[in-house]
Image (cartoon, coloured by chain):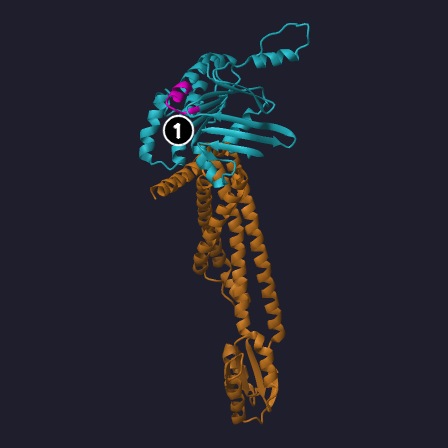
Chain colours: A orange, B cyan
Amino acid sequence: MSAMLNSWGYAFKQAFKQAFRNRTMSFASMFSITAMLLILGLFFILVVNINMASESAKKQFDTIQVYLMDETTFEQASAIIGSLNGTDGVKEATYLSDEEAMANWKVKWGDNAYLLDGLENNPLPNSILIKVSRLEAADSVVSKIKTFDGIEDIKYYKDTVDQLMKVTRFIQFGAMIIILFLVIISVVVVSNTIKLTVLAREREISIMKYVGATNWFIRGPFLIEGILIGILSAMISVGIVSLIYYKTMELLGPTIFVILSTTMVPGGFLAVRLIWIFTALGISIGACGSIISMRRFLDT
Amino acid sequence: MIAFDNVTKSYGTNIGIQDVSVKINKGDFVFLVGPSGAGKSTFIRLILKEIEADRGSIKMNGMEITNLANRHIPKLRRSTGIVFQDFRLLPKKTVFENVAFAMEIVHMSQRSIRRQVPQVLSLVGISSKASKYPHELSAGEQQRVAIARAIVNNPTVLIADEPTGNLDPDTAWEIMRLLEQINLRGTTIVMVTHAKDIVDKMGKRVIAIDKGRIVRDDASGSYGAYEDERMLSCLPTGGVFVSHVK
């Protein structure tokens, strides 16, 4: 037990000493991990925001509007709503009378609502609004609606939603690939950087082996050094990414809201997640980097 | 202690050592001599299990090491101290740290390190240089540090690979006296060397290797007539000028 503690203590002490004595190399490793995480972070933020925009856009399109014929009675409509409410994929079906629809319009038109007062009679039909719980279920819901009598027209933005979903899926898939690619690159870059530090200490390692050090004893300090560098890089890059994000939000947030009618993902929400993701990534990149780069030197 | 039984090791078509059988007892002081490429290094590397024997058995302290699992190698090396011609000290560690390092590897506590390192440093006669770095020392002093590192964990065997190769004659003799002193404490010493005068004057056991075979094993030998004869036989007859090659 005390031997274990001794060797852990040794590994930590050595890791700090090594990192400090080889500070140029430590700095180089840190710089490359930070750079990678920065790119990764900016990319991550972009993807999260695109996802959020597409989600909120989807929500705007998740309603099917069913226009009823003028002669359809409220009772008939209620029967339709009743049977729809039990259907798979339907979140909520509600009745919207022509007066309510007009009132909604007036709200939307705002200051110009007085123009609507000029209408002699209400041109809007009674309708049923159906919110679908899953967009994928919209098609089956629509075909079910078609079986009812007294329906004038069905409107829903299938093509738009399909397009949107296609684009989102494409972006998500592309993002996964690029993130994976970036992680692989950073492991390679870091393992090469650490390999240089190991190479500089090749002699030291061979001496360690002659004196009877186990592979883990030799690896320990390098591993901890790699992890330390990883954690530090994570902290730095989270800081920089957050700063960039907050600045961007300040500058572009309002514009984006106007154009896409969606807000940007709150910075605090992202920062907390980024800290976890980056720390985990930094630790794994640092650890993998040092283990990979040491493999050659530890083969007996 | 160290027992080779019909050990053969070849590198492709090159022979390292062939059918070598030899026994080195506890407390022996053995010189391993022979021309370059004769198989001395192979012999040492087999003892350290840096390389695997093709055939035969090697026992260290009664334990068969030819089939030793990789994870047990560190333990084997800890029972064997080693000193090199080029010292191989860690340049960024002080004298004290270089010696302490060997103890840290075997998980000794800081307290025993602080107690034992000064003792060993004083044994090899460099107590006053404990806080110096290797590059601040003379060659002889560096070799003393290397010896201190090799013996600090009380190994049963000390292997010295041309320990005097980089030293001037006077310093070389100081190192030899130190090794003799360590040998007197019961540590077996196997020393590879080309230094004829040292081997001759010490009068210890001499094992001569050539072309992978043991060609001579004298309990109290000299560097060897054999060497001289071999060199002479290479010369054209008619005996021109022959200077002794050392």
Q: Which quadrant holds the N terminus of chain A?
A: top left
Q: Is residue B53 visible?
A: no
- Is residue A127 placed above or below A248 in the rendered structure? below
Amino acid tagged 1: Val
Q: Position of residue A155 (x, y in %)?
A: 60, 81
> Is B132 on the left or on the right of A175, as rendered?
left
Q: Position of residue B224 (x, y in %)?
A: 54, 14
Q: Quadrant of residue B202?
A: top left
- Is residue A275 placed above or below B18 in the rendered structure? below
Point 50% across, 83% down: residue: A103
Point 59% across, 25% down: residue: B212
Q: Quadrant of residue A150?
A: bottom right
- Please report the bounds of the magenta region as a residue range: B179-188
Q: Secondary structure at mark 1?
A: helix
- Front residue of this view, candidates B237 and A229: B237
Q: Check residue A285 for magenta coloring.
A: no
